[in-house]
Structures are given as structure tokens and as C-alpha cells.
Image (cartoon, helix red, strand yellow):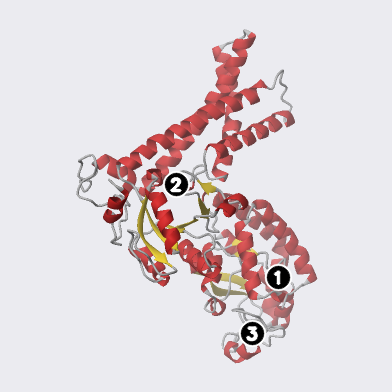
Amino acid sequence: MSKSAVKQTIRTDAVADPEGTRPLVAAPASSDGRDIRARTPYLLRQVAGREAHRRIGRVVVLFGIDVAGIWGAIFSALAVKGLVLGEFDADMVIDGTFDLFAFAALVTVLLFARVGLYDPRPSRPGYARTIACLIQATVVSLIFALVSGTEFSTYWLFFGGLIFASVYVGGGRWLFELVSGGLLDAVGYRRRAVLVGTSRRIHAVAETLEDSPAARYEPVGFFALDQSEPNGLRDLGHLDRLSDLIIEASIEEVIITDSDFPQDRATDVISKCHLHGVRVRIAPSTTDVLTQRSDPVLGEGVPLLEVKPPVFEGFDFVVKRVFDFFLAVLLLIVASPLLVLTALAVKLTSRGPVLHQNLRPGIGGKPFGCLKFRTMYEDAEQRQATLEPLNEASGAIFKIRDDPRLTRVGSFLRRNSIDELPQLLNVLRGEMSLVGPRPLPLRDHARLEDWHRRRYLVLPGVTGLWQVSGRSNLDFDDMVRLDFMYLERWSVLLDLVILLKTVPAVVRRRGAW
């Protein structure tokens, strides 16, 4: 079928297709004479249509390939050593393999999970990342063996194991990509995508994706920033319709075709997409490819760069949640005397409950009861409106230095951030994290701009970069930018650094009012 014919047959409706199994084109017949409107065989249709099953199956198969590859690599290295030295004994080789296998497999799988090697196909790294992780796993295993006092007559086991692991694991994963890609092609699987940019670049990117069958895209249409030109795709109108279209047409990806896309518009597009769980990719210029550190998504015809949402999921989420839970338990135990004394001080100095449960938006904007020691008089909420003209903070936040609603004890607790300690219970309940964007009151949340709301893609934190970078002295927009910086650069080490820096920030009372 010619390129022009394909353009004329690209489907232009925007009807939702939850299973994502419709073919890219809708002509009466394909070039091989098969009617492409015919039903896909049932078993193959289930492969593409059951997203949860596909996800579980993908992880199980890749995990099996990796574990089997590591076992085979250790076995092969020991077997070769025995054959070369003339001391080969099958039972000894098998026993030696099992002795070393568990630790090596655990380290490898954890590293693979950390870098996304169990992620969906569109964002899963390739062979180079696999080899890099195998090298790291080998180094970690070698260091562990040396530290534990294990003696080796030769280090061939590690070098040989790395060579065989590269062949077995890399080859197994290559075969998986080949077979699974063939199955997806057989069922006509396509990712429903929208192109955004200028007409010229939209046309160029659409043609490139069309010429690359491995890309597996179904372009639903485009949003053009300039006067749109005929390109065989549906003009979806004004960009303000993007959120509605994502829901109506089950959009899976949005591709920004211009690397110099206006920053304010790009931020808005990315925010809307990430709020709906939609992947965003950018078609870069040559300069971008040479200078940016983003990981390219290969095999798509055009070298797309993925803009990943600032969320913690999968392995990252497990690591952060375990870290939060156990450290919160430890902090509650250590701080228990202070918690008891504070509760008595609040109860004995003013009327009202010891703890105040303030509704605040959490992850995804869903409200939760944020716990604090009560620092204000009982009529604080009713006096809010009369104090609004005295607000000294910028942006959406309400702050005044000498708030008349504060009790004497409450003022002390605020200055020293002791009133926030009950939020460790929110951490245990899974409503908050130790480190993250601070949750705002509903009054402040209602005044946020759209781009501010990206901070609600993750659990709010007891402390964060706000607290160690100036606290209330910062401009609100700068605070939000610090949140984004934290989300993009998160690691357990960064969480530890922020927690440690929180202590001197609280002691100095910098910006605490």
C-alpha cells in the first residue's frame, strides 16, 4: 500500500478503545488480501487486551529469564574452570552454583528493577543498560565475597560469570522482545497517540512513525499551534481539549513534535498528561540529542525522549515505603517522651483537643486528615476570613508572623516545628511520607495554579526541601520548583540528607513563622 493510500485510510474517529487492539488503518483489505476488519483470533486478542495479565506475565517471564540466566552463567563459569583444570565434577559444580546463586540473583534482580528493566516495552531500557547492571552486580558480588573472607585461587568465576550472564540474560531478553513483539504485531496492537506541535514538525514525525512499523503507534490526531496543514491526520482543534480527549479516546501517549515548544504550554501539556497517567515524549532536535542526558527510546523511527512523571512507583515505591515505615516507627519511639510532654502542655493551657486533624489534599488531591498538635484557639477557623487582608506570604499560602489565633504554647510549638510530630502517624498509615512536598490546607490548595498541582502526584511529606531551604522566607513558586527538583532527583540518600538537614533548620528556626 502506498504512503498516500495509508494516509487516506488512517482512522480519524476518537472513540475509546479500552483494549487498544484496533489496527492502525481501516481499509477494506490489506495488501496480503486479508480483510483487516476480521476478528483477531481469540487467544491472540487476549494477549493484547488483558493489560493486567500482560503486566504480570511480562514481569514473570523476564524475571525467569534473568534468574535462569544468572544460574546458567555461574554454572558455566564453574564448569569451564573445572574442564580447563581437569577437575570437572558435575555434582561439585551444581553445589557450587547453588552456593553462589542466591546472592548474585538477588543483587541482579534488584538492580534490574531499579533501572526499569521490568517496565513496559515502550520505556524498558535495552541491552546496554542490561550489561551495565550485570557489571555492577558482578562488582557488588566480588566486594561481598572479599569482605566476607571468602578466598579464591582465581577470580575467573566473576569474569567468566559476567561473560556468560551477558550472553544468557541478554540473549534471553532479546528473544523475549522478538517473540512478544511478534505477538503484538499479530494482534495489531497500537499505542493510541496524539501529536502536538507545529504543522511542519507534526507532518515529519507522523511520516517517520508511519515508516517504522516497530513503533506500533496509532495516531488519533494532532493539536497544531499554528495554521494546520493537511497531513492525513485529524485536526483535534484547540489544545484546551487535551484533557477531555485523553479520557474520551483512551489516549496512551502524547508526542510533542517540537523541541522548542513554548515552555508554558509544554508545562501545561505535561502536567495534564501525567495527571491522567499518560506518557509524554518529545521529538528532539539534533542539539537536544547531543546535549541532553535523557534516555532515548530506541526503535521508534524517530529518537523520542521520554518526559517521565515525578512519581514513585514499582520498586522505587517499595523502597521509599519501607524506609518511611521503619524510620517513622523509630522516630516515634525516640520522641515518645517529647510527645507526652507536648500533649500535656496543650491540654493544660487551652481548651480543645490535643490533636487537630486538618483536612488536606494528599496524593492525587484526595483529602486526608493531617494530624498536628493543636496550636490555635478553638475559633481559629471562624476568624480566618477577617485575617485574610493581613496575609504576608506570596502565592497561595496564608501566613502572618504574629497570628492572634495562636496559643502561647502553640506559638512555641510552631517555631520549633514540634506541632508536626504527630504526622509520623500519618506516615505509618500510608497517607504521608517522611520527605516530600508539604501538604497545604484546603484554603491554599484552592488557589493553586494548574502547574502547581503536579506536586500532588506523590505522597506529601512531613519535611522537604522547603524546610531546609528557607521555609516561609521563600517565594511560593520557588517552593514548588524545589518540590519538582526533589521529585526528579529522588533517592534514599537524598531523603536521608533532607532529614538530617531538617534538624539544624528547625534549631535555627530559619523562616519558621
Mark 3 or 1 closer to N-term? 3
Q: Nearer the viewer, residue 30 or 435?
A: 30
Q: Which mark is residue 301?
A: 2
Give amino acid for label 1: Ile
The answer to whether residue 476 shows anywhere in this view is: yes
Residue 209 at x, y percent in the picture: 40, 50
Q: Helix, strand or loop at disc 1?
A: helix
Residue 414 position within the rendered picture, expressed as x and y whole percent measured from the top left: 70, 75
Name the residue beneath numbered marker 1: 418
The C terminus, quarter of image: bottom right
Q: Amino acid at mark 2?
A: Gly
- Residue at far right of view: 508
Q: Which mark is residue 377?
A: 3
Residue 26 image position (x, y, % from top left)? 25, 52
Circle 1 packing at 10 Å, graded few (<14), some (14-19), many (20+), is some
Amino acid at the residue labelled 3: Tyr
